[in-house]
Amino acid sequence: MRTYLTKRLLLMIPTLFGVAAVVFVIMRVIPGDVTLLILGGDQTGRIDPQQLAAMRQQLGLDQPVAVQFGQWLWGVVRLDFGTSLWTGQPVIEEVLIRLPLSLEVAILATIVSVLLAIPLGMLAAVRQDSWVDYVIRVGSIGGQAIPSFWVGILVILFLVIYFGWGPPLEFTPPWVDPWANFQQLVWPVATVGYRYAAVTTRMTRSTVLEVLREDYIRTAWAKGLRERAVVIRHALKNAMLPVITLIGTEFAFLIGGLVVTETVFTLNGVGRFVVDAVAHRDYPVVQALVFLIAFCFVVVNLLIDLTYAWFDPRIRYH
Amino acid sequence: MSVQYPLVQASAAPLAPRLTFAEEVTSFVWTKPLGAAGALIILMMLFVAVLAHLLAPYDPYLGDYAAQFARPQAEHWLGTDEFGRDVLSRIMYGARIALFVGFTASFAGCSLGALLGVLSAYCGGTLDLLLERVMDVLLAFPQLILALAVASILGPAVPNVVIAVAIPIIPRAARVVRATALAVKENQYVEAVHALGASQRRVVLQHILPNVMAPYIILLTAQLGSAILAEAALSYLGLGAAEPTPSWGLMLSGSAPSYAEKAPWIGLFPGIAISLAVFGFSLFGDSLRDALDPKLRGR
C-alpha cells in the first residue's frame, strides 16, 4: 500500500508540471496583451510606448518566457501564486474570497445528486424496461441534454415574473446568515444538482444492470434472500466502483468548472473568475486557477482509487 | 490394444439467418423504442438542416425593424428577436451549425484519440508512457475550460469552435480505445498475423483498428450530444460563433436574457432546440451502446 501511494504521489508531479506548462503556454499564445488592456489608451486609442514598456517591466512581462515560467513554478512550490495583473491583489487572496462559494455549491450539488441518483438508478435497473425505467431514463437523459445556462435563465425568469424575486447579489456565507445563503444558492444548486444527478443516475443504472447478471446474484436469489438484500447488499455495493469514480471526478470539476452556471446566476465563484481572468489576460490568475483545479482533480482521483479497496476487497494495491 | 472410436458424423448447427438492413432496423425499433425515438429526432434535425434554405420562411440574417419583438403568430411561428429576425428561420439555420460542429468535432476528436490510443497500446514502452502522461494532463483540465482556452487563442468563428470542442475529446477517446486495444493486441490472431510476416502498419490498420470500432462508435455518438452542448456554451460565453451567425448558443446569449421578460420566446425556443438535439443523440447513443455491447445485448 505504501509503495503504491508513493508511486501515485510521484506520478502526480509530471501531471501537474504538464498542466502548469500547458496553461502557461496557452496564456502566452492567446492574442491580446494585459498591459494594453490595463492602459486602455487615450481617447484616440493611442498608447505611449514608454508607458507600455514601463508597465511591462513593472509586471515582469519583459523577461524571457522561460524565466517567467521558472519564476512562476518556483513560486508555486512555495505556495506563492503571484499577484493579479488586473487588481494587484495576491492571487491566493482573490481565490480564497471565491472558493467558499464554489466549494459550497459543489458539495451541496453532490449531496443532492447522490441522494437522487443512487436510488433512482437502482430502481431503473431493477425495474428494467418498465414504465418506471422509461420515466427515469427520459428524466436523466433530459437532465444531461438541457443546457444548464438555459435552465438558469428560465429559473430566473420564472422567479422574477411570477414571484418578483431576485437572488441576493452579495454572497453571504452560511455561518453568517443561513437563510440568505440558502436563498442565494438554492437555484444554482438545484440546476447543477439535477444535471449531475442525471449523469450519475445513468451510470448507476447501467452498472447495476451489469452486476445483476452476475452468478453471485443468481446465488443470492437462490438462497432465498429478499429483493432488498440482493439489490442493496449484493448488487449495489459491487456496482459502486464506476459510480464513485464518476461522483469524485464530477465533484473535482464542479469546484472550478461551473463557468456557465456562475455566469448566469451572477455568482462570484471560481469558474466565473476563470472566464474573467481569461478575458483580462490576467496570466497569474488563470495559471493559478487552472493549476488548482487540476490539483483537486488529481487528488480526488487518488482518493477515489484508494476507496476502491473498501468497496471491493479483492483489490489490493502494490 | 488399440481402441476403436466410432466415427461420429458431425454436422454444423444451422446458423441464424443473416438479417437484412431493413430487418435489423425493424428489430432495433421494436427492442429499443427510446433509441428509435432518438434516431427520429436526429433524422428530423438532419432534414431541417439540409433543407433549411427551402424550409425557412425568412432570411435568418435579415432584420425587419417593423417586426421587432413580434409574438409567435401566423407570420412568425416562433416570433422575432430584437432586430426583427425570424426566430424559426434562425433555429432552422442554426441546426446546420449545431450538426456541423457536433459531427466534425466529435469525429475529429474521437478519430485522433482512437488512433493515439491504438498506437499507445500497440507500441507500449516509452511512447505509451509519454502519451499517457500527455492524456493525463489534458484530462486534468475541465472540458469547458480547455475549450475556452483554445477558443480564446483561435478567436470566435465556427471552424475554430470545432477545434476547441474537438481537443478535449481526444484524451477521453484515447483512454477508452487504448484499454480495448490492449486486450485486442493479446489475441492469438494478432500473433498469427505477425508470424505471417505482416508489417506493423498492416497489423494496426487492418487487424487492431477494426476490432476497436465498437467502443469508438459508442464514444462517437456519446460525444455528439456533448459537442453540441459545448458549442452552445462557448457561443453563449461569446467565444463560439460570432454575430450574426444563427448559432443556438449565441441566440441565448447577450440580449435574450435581457429581453426575457418582454419577449421570452427569443430565449425559449433556441434552448428547446439545443435540448431536443442533445436529447435525441443521447437516446440514440444509449440504445446503440446497449445493442453493440455484448454484455448488454439481448436485454
Image (cartoon, coloured by chain):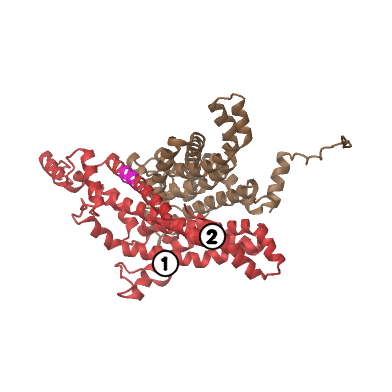
Q: Which residues are magenta?
A: A16-23
- Residue nearest the viewer, comparing B286 with A46: B286
Q: Residue at x 16, y 46 (%)?
A: A59
Q: Is residue B29 left or right of residue B205?
A: right
The picture places residue B247, in percent across and down from the top left corner, at 44, 46
**Label 1 packing within 10 angstroms: few (<14), some (14-19), many (20+):** some
Chain drawn in red: A
Q: Secondary structure at mark 2?
A: loop
Q: Amino acid at mark 1?
A: Leu
Quarter of the image with the N terminus of chain A is bottom left
The picture places residue A15, in percent across and down from the top left corner, at 37, 46
Q: Is residue A316 visible?
A: yes
Compared to residue A180, the image places residue A137 above or below, namely: above
In the rendered structure, find residue B186 and report the number of the disc placed on it.
Answer: none
Q: Amino acid at mark 2?
A: Pro
What residue did someone put label 1 on? Answer: A108
* Chain label for disc 2: A
- Residue nearest the viewer, comparing A35 with A296: A296
